[in-house]
Amino acid sequence: WSAGGGESAATQARLYLVDLAGSERVKESCAAGARLVEAQHINKSLFALQGVVQALADGKPHVPYRNDLLTLLLRPALGGNCCTTLVATTSPAQQHSAESEGTLRFASSCRRIRGEVFVNQVQRPRPWETPAAPAAPAEEPGPARCPWAEVDATRAT
């Protein structure tokens, strides 16, 4: 808590809980119709997420967050001031070895992401104290002026 000024410092945080679906193998699942379209969207989103994770892990200057809605929504949780935990679930079955290997590669590239973490503090007024009245302006403000209007007027002469 701050000592004076009628404000207090509060720590602010966000929690994102995301359950990402695994890649959909269309040949194995025999998906058709609406399920096929859904599987295609899942695969497209996971591909975009892999691109963002790869760019962050490699330290590239441009990170393609805008390539997909999933990566756009997860932007605060992927890069910047965040602590992210990934739980990668694999299967010991031989028939799922390709999916398990892909999951482990994705987790390995997520592990290489480094960000700077700092405490988010915001100043909030204390509810039990009345805020001080704002100081009255010394003089009446005149009409707003547009700086471009002055430039145009000098060009006309």
Image (cartoon, rainbow, N blue to C red):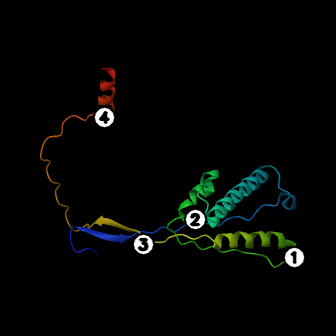
Q: Residue at x 17, y 60 (%)?
A: 132
Count of marks placed on residues: 4
Query: Quick one: SS at disc 2?
Result: helix
Circle 1 crowding by C-alpha within 10 Å: few under 14, some 14–19, many from 20: few
Image-based side of 58 in relation to 94, left or right: left
Separation (CA) of disc 4 from disc 2: 41 Å
Question: SS class of the residue under badge 1?
Answer: helix
* Label 1 or label 3, whichever comes before in sequence order: 1
Residue position for label 1: 94
In terms of sequence position, does the residue under pointer 1 or pointer 2 come before the other? 2
* Circle 2 crowding by C-alpha within 10 Å: few under 14, some 14–19, many from 20: many
Q: Is residue 50 left or right of residue 136?
A: right
Q: Which residue is mark 3?
A: 119
Query: At label 4, which amino acid type do we have?
Result: Pro
- Earlier-in-chain disc, 1 versus 4: 1
Q: Earlier in the sequence, mark 4 or mark 2?
A: 2
* Amino acid under disc 3: Val
Q: Which of the two discs, 3 and 2, labels the residue nearer the N terminus?
A: 2
Q: Are marks 1 and 3 in contact (CB under 8 Å)?
A: no
Earlier along the polypeptide chain: callout 4 or callout 3? 3
Q: CA distance from mark 1 to mark 2?
A: 32 Å
Tell me if residue 125 comes above or below residue 157 in the rendering.
Answer: below
What amino acid type should be assigned to the residue bearing mark 1?
Gln
Q: CA distance from mark 1 to mark 3?
A: 45 Å
For label 4, the residue is 147
Left or right, 6 with respect to 35, comes to: left
